[in-house]
Image (tube, coloured by chain):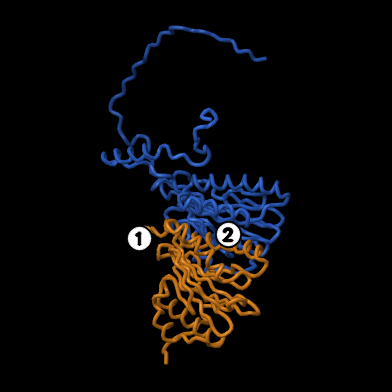
Chain colours: A blue, B orange
Amino acid sequence: MLNTSRKWQSPSGGFSFENTRRNAVLETSLSEKGYSAPKARKTGTTIAGIIFKDGVILGADTRATDDMVVADKNCMKIHYIAPKIYCCGAGVAADAEVTTQMMSSNVELHSLSTGRPPLVVTVTRQLKQMLFRYQGHIGSSLIVGGVDVNGPQLYSIYPHGSYDKLPFLTMGSGAAAAVSVFEDRYKPNMELEEGKQLMRDAIVAGIFCDLGSGSNVDLCVITEKGVDYLRGYDQPAQKGQKEGTYRYKPGTTAVLTETVTPLTLDLVQESVQVMDTE
Amino acid sequence: SVNGEWRSSKVSTGTTIIAVTYDGGVVIGSDSRASMGGEYVSSRVINKVVQVHDKIFCCMAGSLADAQAVTNAVIHQLSFHSMQMGEPPLVQSAASIMRSFCYNHRDELSAGFIVAGWDSKRGPQVFQVSLGGMVLEQEFTIAGSGSTYIYGYVDAKFKPGMTREECLTFTTNALSLAMDRDNVSGGVVHLAIVTEKEAEKQLIPGNKLPVIQSLE
């Protein structure tokens, strides 16, 4: 009987925590010398979504920060999930990216299995169940928006797994700045151009009033007819024109003496290799 | 809190919830504010009164993620139970299912609930299922962070066997008073009124709430 019994093998999927002890030792030894271990890069973001007359508009800034340094000036925070469902991600950049990619493949499989186009609630449910299972350790806040048989819908999902269904939503470090624009000017059943302008203004509020958000405004308009991904819809924070020139004219510094020394070089070896160009 | 630590905190319901029985039914009510770190209102219109079955409602308090997860699990289990029994479930069954989740996962969850409704066996009932899984049946109950401000009011003003109108006034006044004093309760008032005949939902917007300046 002993021959048939097998040693218990721990499941190979999911997260591996092998390096946690090593990381803890490294952190203490670094902090003794006065250094700090590198932190996970956060997107420090402004993301938002609104429902307008014909569908959903999602918006995001494009700055990724590494503590106080801008790591990426033009990253994409609006991720594809399904043909008419997109998701904005805030929080830890890697978590948001990988979570949305996983969801995209799950939703594709589910849709093939049911034989129907995916529903926005399906995406929301799978996301919130996964985030709740990880009890907030996956630090991604998400706004899921899309159009399905039940019409346009917008959901927000927080890192601990709570979710909300609302006509306008903002998340990320610039959420407070962006939601103030919505609270002032949002109306139900807006036209497309009005909606795009409102979304642009909300993201710009986040870009200017939040240190963690910046660079350009990305928009994604999802309607029954299809998706319009407007990358770089607006660039409010472009470099300005310099008012004066700061170059020195040639001759500003007087040349007193000039010495030219030619270097003599000997040809040591020459080899020619013919390239086969047929 | 100058650096915005609220951003990395959990979404909490920070709530005021109440359920009151009257002659022929039960009124269940809540505020509508979800907050983060006691500083940022992440949602000002959230509905904390969730329908778990045709005539049974449940109010959430505590961590929003935990409360939503438990409530969804209870809806799922209660619908199975009801199909197996072939009849509408008892309010006590709903409270019992809720309690088993809260007790078995008491170390991982931080959410409290009020389960209230009507069934054909015992009529209108209110159960409080608190944090660790204790279940108490009461004629009326209040819970959540805002409830501390209205214990005096509800103790003084509650009468058993009120009419529907008296009960609605009592509940709305209690919620108004709590929302005025508690910083993490606010927004609109969500109500559900359950009787033998039907379950009716109401919403009272913030500007239509009673302004209580003096109590005779």
Task: Name the one closer to the observer, A243 or A20.
Answer: A20
Q: Is mark 1 on a helix, strand or loop?
A: loop
Above or below, B162 against A273 in this view is below
Task: Name the one closer to the observer, A41 or B169.
Answer: B169
Residue at (53, 39) in percent of width and height: A13
* Label drawn at residue B2: 1
Is residue A184 at least partly visible in the picture?
A: no
Is A41 on the left-hand or right-hand side of A151?
left
Residue A213, percent from left and from top: 46, 53
Task: Name the one closer to the observer, A246 or B183.
Answer: B183
Q: Do labels 2 and 1 share a chain?
A: no
Is residue A92 at least partly visible in the picture?
A: yes
Q: What is the crowding at mark 1: few (fewer than 14 residues within 10 Å), some, or many (at least 20)?
A: few
Task: Name the one closer to the observer, B104 or A254.
Answer: B104
Q: Distance between the residues labelled 2 and 1?
A: 29 Å
Q: What element carries label 2?
A: strand
Q: What is the crowding at mark 2: few (fewer than 14 residues within 10 Å), some, or many (at least 20)?
A: many
The amino acid pointed to by label 1 is: Val
Q: Mark 2 points at which residue?
A: A155
Q: Do the residues labelled 2 and 1 touch (CB within 8 Å)?
A: no
